[in-house]
Amino acid sequence: GQQVQQSPASLVLQEGENAELQCNFSTSLNSMQWFYQRPGGSLVSLFYNPSGTKHSGRLTSTTVIKERRSSLHISSSQTTDSGTYLCALERPGANTGKLTFGHGTILRVHP
Amino acid sequence: ETAVFQTPNYHVTQVGNEVSFNCKQTLGHDTMYWYKQDSKKLLKIMFSYNNKQLIVNETVPRRFSPQSSDKAHLNLRIKSVEPEDSAVYLCASRPGQINERLFFGHGTKLSVL
């Protein structure tokens, strides 16, 4: 089954609203990363967050290993936040650096 | 700022043709990857190289072959493309093998007619 589940699959916001994106995983992990992808664009690493909470501007990532979940919070959303948000986990033990990705959350922010 | 460079950006070809994609990173990283992103946006690893050595080779058809001349370059050749090869191919790099950020290129979109 799918090892990394993201929710919601898509989200529509009005500019200024906040968003909470979820990533649930069914295996143990070494690390969790969040990426942003604009349509037709490359993946940009937002957070490398194996555990705990990290902040970057309007973005906050929280990973709770015991509960097997990670979240990405976007505050005061802007139209330029529109795109796909992907989480990816790296499993321990394999020593290969292989990331397992979720299907992503498509975010649309309207003005 | 892009530091993982992929060429071409797009490629349209017919079934049975051979294609090659290039990837170069200027970050001094030791490990490079090829990922495939399908139409549903799901990314799956294809290959991983560490310092020119093959580390990961997922269940990928034999018509796919990676080529690395040095640790800054990782190319991908597809001998005889099939319709299901239509996808975006993303190259990535990271300093070591595990527990570090991954840096991606813009991707090469392949369309097989």
Image (tube, coloured by chain):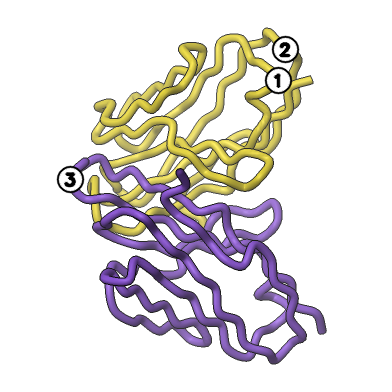
Chain colours: A purple, B yellow
Q: Mark 1 or mark 2, which is nearer the start of the sequence?
A: 2
Kind of residue indicated by mark 1: Pro
Residues indicated by labels 1 and 3 sit on the same polypeptide chain: no
Tag 1, which chain?
B
Estimate the x, y position of residue B30 in percent, counting from the top left. 26, 42
Which residue occupies the foreground of this view, B98 or B96? B98
Q: Which residue is mark 1?
A: B83
> Any mark on residue B15, and which?
2
Q: In which image quadrant can residue B81 be found?
A: top right
Q: Which residue is mark 3?
A: A93
SS at mark 1 in the image? helix
Estimate the x, y position of residue B64 in percent, counting from the top left. 49, 18
Estimate the x, y position of residue A89 in percent, counting from the top left. 36, 55
Relative to B63, residue A31 above or below = below
Can residue A43 be seen? yes
Residue drawn at x 24%, y 45% is B97
Which residue occupies the foreground of this view, B101 or B3? B101
- Check the picture and name the quadrant holding the C terminus of chain B: top right
SS at mark 3 in the image? loop
Relative to A4, residue B107 above or below = above
Kind of residue indicated by mark 2: Val
Q: Comparing marks 1 and 3, which lies closer to the viewer?
A: 3
Q: Could you tell me how far apart the alpha carbons at marks 1 and 3 are, in whole angstroms?
A: 35 Å
Do residues under tags 2 and 1 come within 8 Å of each other at their CB atoms?
A: yes
Residues indicated by labels 2 and 1 sit on the same polypeptide chain: yes
Estimate the x, y position of residue B47 in percent, counting from the top left. 39, 31
Do residues under tags 3 and 2 come within 8 Å of each other at their CB atoms?
A: no
Q: Could you tell me how far apart the alpha carbons at marks 2 and 1 are, in whole angstroms?
A: 7 Å
